Amino acid sequence: MTTTLQFHGAAGTVTGSMFVLATPKARILVECGMFQGPKTIKELNYQPFPFDARKLDAVLLTHAHIDHSGLLPKLVRAGYRGTIHATIGTGELLDWMLPDSAQIQESEVDQLNRRRRRFGEDEVEAIYTEIDAARTLKQVKGIPYDQWRQVAPGMRARWWNAGHILGSASIELEVETGNPAQPQLRILFSGDIGPANPALQEIARAPSGVDYLVMESTYGDRERDNLDDAGRQQVLLAEMRTAIAAGGNIIIPAFAVERSQELLSDLISLMATGRLPPLPTYLDSPLATRATEVFERHAHLLDVKPVGDSPFRAPNIHFTASAEQSQQLNRINGGIIIISASGMCEAGRIRHHLRHNIWRPDATVMLTGFQARGTLGRLLEDGADRVRIMGEELVVKARIRRLDIYSGHADRSDLLAWARKRLPVHRGIFLTHGEPEALAGLAAGLGDMEGVEPERIFVPSLDQLFQLDRADGPLLLDESVPARLVNSGAEALKKGWDWHNEMSALNLDLHRRLQQLPGDKERLKLIRELARVVAEK
């Protein structure tokens, strides 16, 4: 048996990070993330794992975001009984994030099954339950930064601060291959790398001189303004003043972990110094509230100075707990700030707030993070004038603003600078966690870097398997299209858009066209023409 690395997620797409590293002595899983985006891609979460969970010796996590950790309860449900190694901060965040994710899975499946019963279709089962999440948390073991740990036979690892979110890390592995020609390999999994000037975290660190680098590429084709704290707050101040002048509510979709806390910290600073009025500000996400408490416990690790006892609390900051409290916010037509999850507008309370505000010309929606293709957030970012939320078609009249200043990811220049400090990389660089344009952009930048051979840069596709313990670099062992993508999955991965998106767009266009026609006679004619086309197929 040789030493191999197989890419079961975040390959050709951003989400679903999942990599199996195998040697003659052990088999480990690095990351166990959930796929997000178009429905065709999210359906991969319901399919069986393309490996036997019972045969894994260990699981290693870089951080707590759901696209890196969200399928852990499914893994335990499938029979994994070993240790889940993560930093202490990641473990504390998982205590809240995994049960919250399970609750979302059960709620969404309950709604789906109600619809399926009405149409006489078979019911589906949730990916996992809160019971599965609770069992999973018992297997999580907290690891300090910068300390080696034996994680499996012939494998030891240490976690380096990646500057992305609380507890985030790059993972360095030393691996015994069992191959006399190449007895040991050093492999670095970057995880998600933070920007050059993170709002709350320290700057990313990691070792150099590894054999293989598995590197994220989220913003591999995009540059952002490199702002310090004062510059970031100045941009937010200008946006907030314009939004306040418009008179409506300010709706901010935000990831519950890190982004919500960054926003609270900056808003409190601007209000405490009189640059902004102390508007009623609501953090409307139970998960974000719990995550904020974790951040407060780890405040000594954060690069932020509290205005009062906490950098995340002030008299005008309110943490909504119940669904009833959340619903009451939608009775207010202007003058408040609502920060709510999810950051890509795909689930949670944010969809209710968008539904009540997105058609208001005086409202403002501020997108503060990465929006994956096929998500509602991406549709808004790309300028959609109509969207469907919770089955209801809504016109987009609110101001849609995009603030790149809060990304937890390094941009192209930051990624290249981080990679340059890791050199030399002796055998190969694998680029993951990016859309096709981002992957190509980062590959081109790395290929131009002194000390990097372009032919040693690899962009794996989903489920591709590479042999690592070869003197001349990795060998691709399997490049066939995986069975789980045989239908439309491969195309959806490539485009970030599937037939569900096309159908939604068609419904919106059809409704708009019917409204534009002069009378019912013309509308009936168009409907009959469409029915004839469908019947002929």
Image: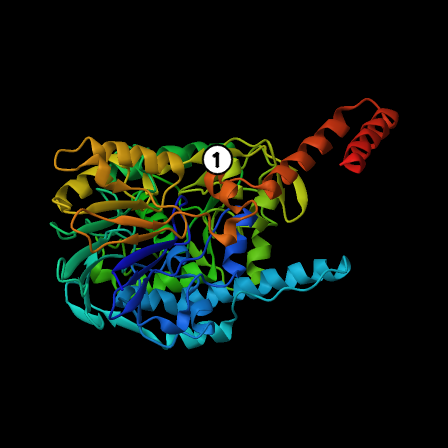
Decide if residue 239 is in sight here: yes
In the figure, residue 276 lies in which quadrant? top left
Disc 1 element? helix
Give 134 or 341, whichever is nearer the viewer: 134
Q: Position of residue 518 (x, y in %)?
A: 82, 22
User: In the picture provided, is 320 more to the left or to the right than 55?
Assistant: right
Q: Position of residue 2 (x, y in %)?
A: 25, 61
Give 381 or 318, whichever is nearer the viewer: 381
User: In the picture provided, is 314 more to the left or to the right than 351?
Assistant: left
Look at 23% across and 54% down and name the residue there.
468
Look at 33% across and 68% down and name the residue there.
92
Tally of numbered discs: 1
Question: Which scheme is used to colour this image of the protein?
Answer: rainbow
Q: Which residue is mark 1?
A: 381
Image quadrant where one finds the C terminus: top right
User: In the picture provided, is 387 more to the left or to the right than 200?
Assistant: right
Give 431 or 334, whichever is nearer the viewer: 431
Q: Position of residue 501 (x, y in %)?
A: 59, 40
Disc 1 marks which amino acid? Answer: Glu
Q: Residue furthest right?
A: 521
Q: Residue furthest top?
A: 518
Image quadrant where one finds the N terminus: bottom left
Label 1: few (<14), some (14–19) or many (≥20) C-alpha neighbours in 10 Å: some
User: In the picture provided, is 478 more to the left or to the right than 246?
Assistant: left
Q: Position of residue 140 (x, y in %)?
A: 33, 73
In the figure, residue 522 lies in which quadrant? top right
